[in-house]
Image (spheres, rainbow, N blue to C red):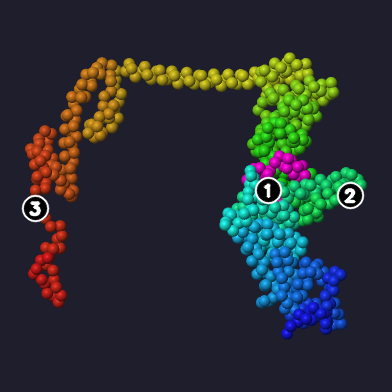
Amino acid sequence: MDFSKFRESGDLSDIVVILGGTEFPLHRFPLYAKSEYFVKVSRTSPADSNKVELLDFPGGADIFGIVADFCYNMKIDMTKNNIVQIRCAAEYLQMTGTGNLIEISDKFLQDTITSGKLSRSTGAITSLLLYCVTIGPLAEVAGIVEACSDAMVESWLKPPTKFTDPSNLKKQGSSVDKRDDKTLKGLCNLPLEWFVKLMTSARECGVRPGLLADMATRYISLVLDRDDSEKSMQDAGSKPGKESAEKSTSKIDAVKGTKKIDAGHVLDAVIMELPEEAFSDEVMTIDWITRTFKLATLRGCRCRRPLVKAAGEIMNKLAPDDLCIISPSLLRDIVQESCNDEGEAERACRIIDTYMAEMVRKGVLTGETFRLLASAAPDEARKSHDQLYGILEYVLTAERDKMSDDQQQELVNRVNFTLVSEDILHQALASDFIPPAYVAKGALALCARLKKDLEVMTATASKQDEELRKYNYSYKRGKVTTTPAPRSAYSSAPPYQRGGLSDTDYEPTKDSDPLKVLDSMLSGTDRQTDEVLASARNKLASGAGAGVPYNSFRPVQLGEHDISFEEELEFKYDRAFRAMDNSRAKPRSGGYGYRSSFRY
């Protein structure tokens, strides 16, 4: 039966659905056939009630009109701009079952997401997520947020293909392409919970840290702008003008998910999800880190530690002039936080000294700034206080008339004169604002260091002299000795048992003539060779009686070669060949006891 004419005319209507100020005269049967929601409402409502009001319906009256057409078996138009609302409306009205609206809209939504993945069109997937933002938690219940997030991560991981949009080209000198730039701006409008889940999934799947860093900096920058806008409105003490109010409202509404969430919670949730490699990306500028660290310090956030580490890495690479853009109070907080990490205190002191030295060069360092920064790091972190004394001398010279004696004494106490060099002590002695007691203390410490160094050098020289005396004594004793050195068991054996002559076969004595000894060694070479050959023959011959395979060598006495080498070979090989297979010499038997007399 065709119900479309009743849907268009509203004739015989027995139920009215109200959305806001719009009323839809409909019929119970088509609605009950498609929607479990209306069935439950009819069971709980009074029998004479024929009106149903839908609150917070996804997409409003326009989307409900499409859903109502579907209930009347009318053709509906689903596009990428309304599919999220239709899918959520079907979830709202519980339109389950085969061929119902949930199944149909799910299929269309998956086709839309797949098309975006194939073309690497992250912008299309971002649009779906932004439609989910307008709907709220129902989109997450319907599984749309998770499906879009997974598709987004998959698009980031896969390289471009021939289906990729040609407009998705990289910016010159940038690691983020145009489409990704638009995508990241859109993702900043996601609620905090959705944004953090997307970052977590991307990090676990191996998305490049630079992209995660870009996402985090953009999202947190909006939070910082919102916080600054709120502070400016509070400081004004009155309602701002129309133009500034609209600007502040736009900044506040830019991060919808963080509108009612504490900014410190946002910082912890986002920054703590970043991998360590992301903090070294170029988007992590010193300006962004200092702004974020300032807010994190005010809110007592857990993310201060990774921010301090990132700030230390960046400040080590900054030129002294660029380092001065950081305020002294913020630099002090960063240094104090970094000193809690093992091995970071010395680097923090170098940053502070470089910072103050640059301010001295510009002529803007004050006594209060010196006191603030010089006390930020522990004294033992500095191995030398020479540079710190030079900065102190500038401050006392420039502001001596503006400071009291107690203030000057406090600044002087920041320098440890026991860790300065001799030249600095001469400068301090020549100045008129360093008490002589400090110079004397430094001189005594310098004398103690010199004495210790002298003792170490003396001990080293004594040890070297002792080793030299032992060496000379051993050398002289070896030259004048008349008794040959004792031979070892190896050296006392015959040469053929030792594998040949060695330098231990001859040990010089006082009366020995090296030329005669060398001549005797050369003349005895033939005899020693004969001894080696005779020994080898005896060993080979003696093994024949112990089951060793036959060999042609026989034991002979030295010099008794009764046959030549050619005769030896003839004796060995000129013999009758003996069959190796003994089984052929045995008679073979046939079947049934018959024994053959033939040999094979």
x and y, in percent, of residue 178 in the image: 67, 50
| Numbered mark located on residue 576 in the image | 3
Residue 12 in which image quadrant? bottom right
Q: Residue at x 77, y 27 (%)?
A: 365
Q: Is residue 106 left or right of residue 372?
A: left
- The residue that disc 1 covers is 214
Q: Is the residue marked by circle 3 packed among few (<14), some (14-19), or many (20+) residues within 10 Å?
A: few
Q: Closest to the observer: 374 or 265?
A: 265
Q: Assign the magenta stretch its main secondary structure.
A: helix
Q: Which residues are magenta?
A: 267-296
Precedes in sequence: disc 1 or disc 3: 1
Q: Which residue is farthest top?
A: 430
- The residue that disc 2 covers is 242
User: Taking 573 as reference, is 404 above or below it?
Assistant: above
Q: Is residue 340 visible?
A: no
Q: Is residue 450 visible?
A: yes
x and y, in percent, of residue 392 in the image: 75, 24
User: Taking 434 as reference, is 561 above or below it?
Assistant: below
Q: Residue at x 66, y 68 (%)?
A: 108
Q: Amino acid at mark 1?
A: Asp
